C-alpha cells in the first residue's frame, strides 16, 4: 500500500497538469483564522482564606492562553486544485496555588504543514468531485515533558468533494504514516482517514464552521505502545463579525483517541470564546 500511495502522489499531479488545457489560473491566500483565546484569574491572599466557603477567595491564580494560525495558499487552474496550508496552534495553562510552586501545562501544541492536490471529474452547482492526493508533516513547538517532539509524515490518496459554498472539503483516503518521534522506535502505519470542512452562513455576518477527521489504523511495522489505533478530532465554531474582518464567537473542540498500550480511551473537550481575523487575498 505504501508504494501505491507514493506512486499516486508522484504521478497523479504531473499527468493531470499535462492533460489540462484550461486558460485561466488563480492564486488566493486564504487566511481561515488568526485567533487568540486568553483568560486570567488573579487571586491575592488566598492562603489566608483556605477555610472560607467561598471558592473564589481561595482559588489558585491561573493564566490560560491559546493562539491559532490557519492559512492556505490556494491555486485553481481549470479542473485542478492545489492547496498548501500552514496550521499552528499552541495553548498553555499556568496555575499558581498559594504557597506552592507554579505549574504549567500545555493544552494544545501543533504545527501542521499540508499539501493537497485535487482533480475535478465532474461538477454540480459548484460542488466538485474527483481523486485527491495529500501529504502532511505533523510536529509541535516544544517537547511535552520527557517525551520528544512529535515528528510524523503522512501521505494519502482517495476521493474528495470540495470547493462548494458549504462543503469546502469532504474526503475519504487511504493513508501511509511514518512516525519518527522516537529515534529508537521509528514506525510506519497504514490506515484510512475521513475528514471534512464545512461552512454555512446562517445570517449576514454570522457563519458556522466545522472541521475535523477520523483516522483508523490497521497495519503497523512494529509495536510502539503510544501509537494510536484510532483518532477523532471535531471542531465547531460560530463567527460573528465585530468590525471589518474581525470576528468573535463561541467554539468547541473534542479529541478522542485510543492507543495500542492503553485499555481505556482518552478524550479532551474544550469550549470557550475566540477572537479571530479572517480574510482572503487574490494574488
Image (cartoon, rainbow, N blue to C red):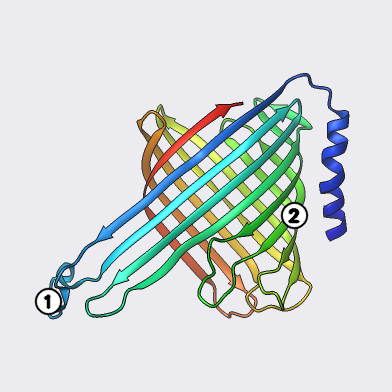
* Cα distance in 3D space between marks 2 and 1: 56 Å
Mark 1 and mark 2 in contact (Cβ < 8 Å)?
no
Q: In the rendered view of the protein, which quadrant contains the C terminus?
A: top right
Query: Residue 91: horizontal and vertical position, in percent?
Result: 43, 59
Sequence-earlier tag: 2 or 1: 1
Q: Is residue 94 left or right of residue 6?
A: left
SS at badge 2: strand
Q: Which residue is drawn at 40% across and 48% down?
A: 36
SS at badge 1: helix
> In the depicted view, which residue is nearer to us: 239 or 276?
276
Q: Residue 49 carries which label?
A: 1
Instruction: Quadrant for residue 1, please give it.
Output: bottom right
Determine if residue 108 is in view. yes
Instruction: Quadrant for residue 20, please give it.
Output: top right
User: Local crowd at mark 2 within 10 Å, few (<14), some, or many (≥20)?
Assistant: many
Determine if residue 1 is in view. no
Q: Mark 2 points at which residue?
A: 155
Query: Residue 46: horizontal and vertical position, in percent?
Result: 16, 73
Query: Residue 40: horizontal and vertical position, in percent?
Result: 27, 59
Amino acid at each position: 500500500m505504501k508504494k501505491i500511495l507514493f506512486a499516486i502522489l508522484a504521478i497523479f499531479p504531473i499527468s493531470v497538469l499535462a492533460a489540462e488545457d484550461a486558460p485561466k489560473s488563480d492564486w488566493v491566500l486564504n487566511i481561515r483564522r488568526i485567533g487568540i483565546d486568553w483568560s486570567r484569574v488573579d487571586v491575592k491572599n488566598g492562603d489566608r482564606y483556605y477555610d472560607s466557603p467561598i471558592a473564589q477567595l481561595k482559588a489558585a491564580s491561573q493564566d490560560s492562553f491559546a493562539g491559532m494560525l490557519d492559512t492556505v495558499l490556494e491555486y485553481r487552474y481549470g479542473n485542478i486544485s492545489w492547496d498548501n496550508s500552514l496550521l499552528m496552534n499552541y495553548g498553555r495553562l499556568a496555575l499558581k496555588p498559594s504557597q506552592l510552586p507554579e505549574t504549567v501545562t500545555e493544552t494544545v501544541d501543533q504545527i501542521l504543514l499540508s499539501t493537497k492536490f485535487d482533480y475535478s471529474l465532474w461538477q454540480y452547482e459548484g460542488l466538485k468531485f474527483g481523486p485527491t492526493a495529500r501529504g502532511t508533516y505533523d510536529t509541535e513547538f516544544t517537547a511535552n515533558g520527557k517525551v520528544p517532539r512529535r515528528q510524523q509524515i503522512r501521505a494519502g490518496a482517495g476521493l474528495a468533494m470540495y470547493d462548494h459554498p458549504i462543503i469546502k472539503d469532504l474526503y475519504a483516503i487511504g493513508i501511509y504514516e511514518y512516525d519518527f518521534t522516537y529515534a529508537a522506535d521509528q514506525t510506519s502505519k497504514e490506515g484510512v482517514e475521513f475528514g471534512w470542512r464545512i461552512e454555512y452562513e446562517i445570517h449576514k455576518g454570522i457563519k458556522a464552521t466545522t472541521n475535523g477527521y477520523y483516522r483508523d489504523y490497521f497495519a503497523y511495522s512494529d509495536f510502539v505502545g503510544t501509537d494510536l489505533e484510532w483518532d477523532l478530532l471535531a471542531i465547531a465554531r460560530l463567527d460573528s463579525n465585530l468590525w471589518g474582518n474581525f470576528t468573535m464567537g463561541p467554539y468547541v473542540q473534542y479529541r478522542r483517541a485510543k492507543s495500542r498500550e492503553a485499555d481505556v480511551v482518552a478524550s479532551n473537550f474544550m469550549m470557550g470564546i475566540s477572537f479571530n481575523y479572517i480574510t482572503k487575498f487574490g494574488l
